[in-house]
Image (cartoon, rainbow, N blue to C red):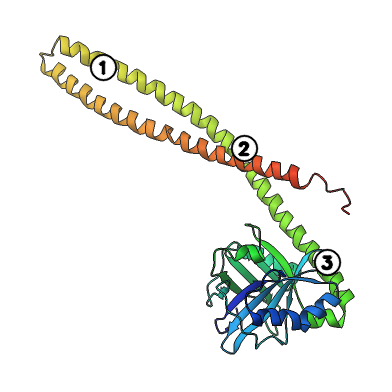
Amino acid sequence: MSNRVVQTPVRKNLSKNVKENEDDISFFQSSSFETKIRSFGYQPETRIFLKRTSGVHCVYYKARSPMGFHVYIEIENDDDGKLKFTSNLNMEELTTGKSLNIPHSIKQGVFDETGEAAIFCPEGMCRVGRKTNSTDMEESNYTYKSLHTDAMIHDNKSIMAYPVIKLGEIMANPELVLEQTSKIMARIRRSAYQNIETSLETYKNEVMTNRKLFSSFLNKQSEIADKLATSMKELHAYQEKSMKNPPKTEKDILFLKQVENNLKIKNDQSTHFLELCSEIENLTNNLSNISEHFKSIIKTFDDDFSDIKVFKI
């Protein structure tokens, strides 16, 4: 990770309905950057700002590419540096050594597939790219300072990656950039689905393992329950007999004490056994939650993907 001064990015939606102050409206009207990227078929949606000592600078634009997927366009020469903008909708760069809850395997995989990308998770954004004069990966991590800002950039609670391109690259060769980012996006999605397939295989194996464990649980709990019941019945029978005919010999008196001691042990074991078996209630609730989650996903599949082959007009 590069040793950069900690900066605070501030994000802003590009909705025409957003009119927070006169400076902001003026910026929208005079922005040459938006005109440039629109001329190449990109539709800007969201701006990401970094707050520096010299002011607020627009660093990234989230935009729709001409092919319909999202990209993050990095501004190399910031002509918006004098924009006066204040908002609590911002992100904050983490200090060196700290990172977001994104597995390294995912970051490395995205980097290997793209070279430059923005990875979003519910916590914030991880920017991966190559170190200067090196083929190694470096990363910069940003967190959301407001709980409601993540939806403005990333409306999914999973981990998703997007290509990062520069305005200069688009202007130099827009056709090549579009072709390359299309391939990169395809690789990102293929890599993401491979991770999903791995998770599905792991889940399937866990289900099979749990079936075996549940079968073992049923057998063991049934066996223990029978043994405890039989043992308690025998001990109670002898205790009741001793109450009717109290032992008189030293041997019988000692045996009765042993019976009483074993009753204590068996009662404690019975309590412990019931405590362990009662965990099945928590496990059942967890399974019910998983079932409901699957039902919700399947319903969303049916609702949102039933018309995949339909050409929208």
Residues packed near mark 1 inside 10 Å, few (<14), some (14 to 19) or many (20 plus): some
Q: Earlier in the sequence, mark 1 or mark 2?
A: 2
The alpha-carbon separation of the residues under discs 1 and 2 comes to 42 Å
Vertical comparison of 196 with 254: above or below: below
Tag 2–tag 3 contact (CB < 8 Å): no
The amino acid type, in three-letter code, at marker 3 is Ser
Name the front one of labels 1 and 3. 3
Name the front one of labels 2 and 3. 3
Residues packed near mark 2 inside 10 Å, few (<14), some (14 to 19) or many (20 plus): few
Report the quarter where the N terminus lies: bottom right
Q: Earlier in the sequence, mark 1 or mark 3?
A: 3
Q: Position of residue 65 (x, y in %)?
A: 81, 68
- Identity of the residue drawn at 53% across and 70% down: 145
Q: Nearer the viewer, residue 5 or 50?
A: 50
- Left or right of residue 58, residue 313 in this image: right
Residues packed near mark 3 inside 10 Å, few (<14), some (14 to 19) or many (20 plus): some
Q: Image quadrant of residue 41?
A: bottom right
Q: Earlier in the sequence, mark 2 or mark 3?
A: 3
Judging by the rendered image, the residue that carries numbered circle 1 is: 236
Vertical comparison of 269 with 65: above or below: above
Q: Nearer the viewer, residue 82 or 27?
A: 27
Q: Position of residue 27 (x, y in %)?
A: 70, 82
Which disc is residue 182 wearing?
A: 3
